[in-house]
Image (spheres, helix red, strand yellow):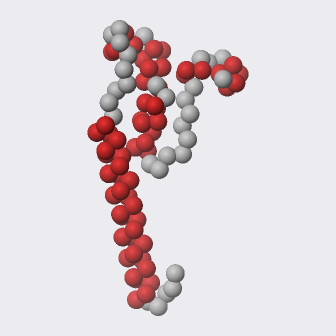
């Protein structure tokens, strides 16, 4: 609310984007804060897109993709660290 008053911006148009594990989580954060609603309202497209009823877009498939990306990244990092450790053992290095 203070930021809204200081910057002369509506409180609904201020978004909070904090640290996320990867870029795929940003649309989910924006959806949870109704960023799509604020953007469409500023462009006068809210009634054109949603008509008289407003609803959250479904991100269920997108959420599945983000879970896959996280799991794949963790698997890749784990195998990379395992390979680095095994190479170090071959050369007598210790981690």
- Up the image or down, 51 lies above or below 16; here it is above
Q: Position of residue 91 (x, y in %)?
A: 44, 89
- Up the image or down, 83 lies above or below 31; here it is below
Of 57 and 45, the residue lying toward us: 57
Relative to 21, 56 lies left or right: left
Task: Give the residue displayed 60% in from the left and 20% down from the top.
Answer: 11
Q: Position of residue 27 (x, y in %)?
A: 42, 35
Q: How many marks?
A: 0
Q: Is residue 16 visible?
A: yes
- Up the image or down, 91 lies above or below 80; here it is below
Task: Give the residue displayed 33% in from the left and 34% down from the top.
Answer: 59
Relative to 94, 56 lies left or right: left
Residue 2 lies in quadrant: top right
Q: Which of the image's four quarters has the N terminus?
A: top right
Q: Is residue 7 visible?
A: no
- Up the image or down, 56 lies above or below 77; here it is above
Task: Give the residue displayed 35% in from the left and 49% down from the top.
Answer: 67
Q: Position of residue 15 (x, y in %)?
A: 55, 29
Q: Position of residue 14 (x, y in %)?
A: 57, 25
Of 30 and 80, the residue lying toward us: 30
Furthest residue to the bottom? 92
């Amino acid at each position: 609310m203070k930021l809204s008053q200081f910057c002369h911006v509506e409180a609904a148009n201020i978004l909070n984007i904090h640290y996320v594990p990867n870029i795929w989580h940003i649309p989910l954060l924006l959806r949870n804060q109704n960023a799509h609603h604020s953007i469409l309202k500023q462009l006068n497209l809210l009634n054109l897109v949603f008509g008289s009823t407003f609803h959250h877009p479904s991100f269920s498939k997108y959420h599945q993709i983000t879970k896959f990306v996280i799991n794949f990244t963790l698997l890749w990092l784990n195998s990379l660290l395992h390979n680095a450790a095994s190479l170090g053992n071959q050369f007598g290095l210790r981690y």
